[in-house]
Amino acid sequence: MLEYQAPQRDFEFLLFELFEVENHWQDIPAFAEFGDDLAKAVLAEGGRLAAEVMAPVNQSGDEEGCRWEDGAVTTPAGFKSAYQELAQGGWLGLSGNPEFEGQGMPKMLGCLLEEMFWAANTSLYLYGTLSVGTAICIDAHGSAEQRALYLPKLYSGQWSGAMGLTEPHAGTDLGIIRTKAEPVADGGYRITGTKIFITSGEHDLAENIVHLVLAKVPGAPAGSKGISLFIVPKFLPKADGSPGERNTFASGSIEHKMGIRGSATSVMNFDGAVGYLVGEENQGLPGMFTMMNYERLSVGLQGLGAGELAYQQAARYARDRLQGRSPLGPQNPEGLADSLLVHPDVRRMLLTIRTLTEAGRAFAVFVGLQLDRAKYLGDADAQALSELLTPIAKAFLSDRGFECAVLAQQVFGGHGYIREWGVEQIVRDARIAQIYEGTNGVQAQDLIGRKVLRDGGAVLGSLLDKVDVQQVPETFRDDLAAAVQQLRAVTNSVVQRCAEDPALAGSIATDYLDLVGYTLYAWIWARVAGVAPADEFGAGKQTCAAFYFGRILPRTAALTQSINAESAVVMDLPEELF
């Protein structure tokens, strides 16, 4: 069975030793009473919930999957009780608006909690994270009445959320959606159309499901400028806020997927369903992106959770599995063989997983810090940084999470391909994070096109200005300085070359995002090595930092060479030869 234990020591190290969050929280009045003891207690209880409630139904939920019958969806055994504990504990309202019964806790802490929940049970937490995203959107763009009605229900988990974007003919290109919203005399709208790939669109975990749906009103401008956003609840709320009449939409089927089988992914058919406008007509895309930007960071954390879960399984297996002898001579002379940990290549795989995952965790907390400062202090620099880092968080964390899952499977050898060990499930579950909420190729296009090229690399440059090589251990100074200089030079070159070659940005975007990610991870590892305590935990950090600089950071040299190639190597092959 897949087992999970939250890495509490690493969580506390990041918060209180690396980022010294007490200093940041003191700057924010909303966090004035939020201290170390409370943060540690929240993390400990979240870890207990993840390990003892969510993880035990992870593998069984995958085996059973969801069932669809006449529009009703039944989730796997044990999911309902686990979801209720997640909801009743207030975990879905952790960062929610206190005016509407949210707890208003720091995003830095929320990133760590989300990682735990994703690692423990990806399919189950999907139901929760869609509710959180729905609440964020309504809080930012809904009317006072909508906020008062929906937010407490979503924070409590009594109602859950879903978002309806994708249509059979329109994936990433939302401007060509066909779902219609016809205004009616009572001030509402009637929504008609079909949405596909709707996560948590129908299920049996909550008493109501609040859909956020993109649609076009009559006479709307063409393209993305003509999209409006609507709240379309499964049951229409009564005057007292309780669920009333069933709305006129239903699940037409659920998808049979490679992974996340315990999560219901529906085709949703809207047949004149009652909808309530969020914000103004033709202004729906900004509202939906508020939700999607949260989901993109959350999906990055999903990849991070997959990496941590994979590492725990593989490290435990490598310690216990006896096979072969060490190249340095027998390490277990009384036994038939040594453990897998004596083999350099097994260590290479495990250290790759560990260094990528631990750096990713620190990176996520850093993004959470920027979001906290932007939201509560109105810090414009932090807002710009969070916007720059969001596509990196989604794509780089999920790409590395899948890489780590596959490496863990390789540590198991043939057993990694067998269902009973569970590691093949981690691979299948991790794969979707690279696809939904905007594929990772789209994230790379966003980074290079909407962020770096738009400002000539100014925000990225301001981030790199924060890298003070004199504040990290001397061992890593030269390599870190060279990595930062390399990224600056590549960025300047890309900005200049893209002005002359319109196909260049798309042809190098993914490599460029990876180059940024690996460089930022080097900064993180150098900082970690500089503050690691003089104990066994700290020694592990020092060794991992050395491994990262010696074996992972060199990937940036190949990426730089690839980025320096012209777009012709991608674009010159005629279509008929594909």
Image (cartoon, grey):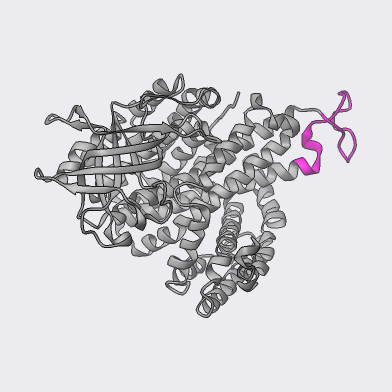
Quadrant in which residue 576 is drawn: bottom right
Q: At 65% across and 44% down in the image, what residue appears?
A: 353
Magenta-span inclusion, residue 332 = yes
On-image quarter of the N terminus:
top right
* Residue 371 on image: x %, y %: 38, 53
**Horizontal and vertical percent for residue 108?**
42, 46
Which picture quadrant has residue 497? bottom right
Residue positioned 19% across, 37% down in the render: 149
- Nearer the observer, 54 or 485: 54
Residue 215 in picture, x, y percent from top left: 28, 50
In the image, 214 versus 2, the foreground residue is 214
Quarter of the figure that contains the C terminus: bottom right
Per the rendered image, the range of residues in magenta is: 323-346
Tell me which residue sits at (67%, 48%) in the image: 544
Residue 342 visible in the current orientation: yes
Q: Is residue 323 above or below residue 183?
A: above
Q: Is residue 124 left or right of residue 307?
A: left
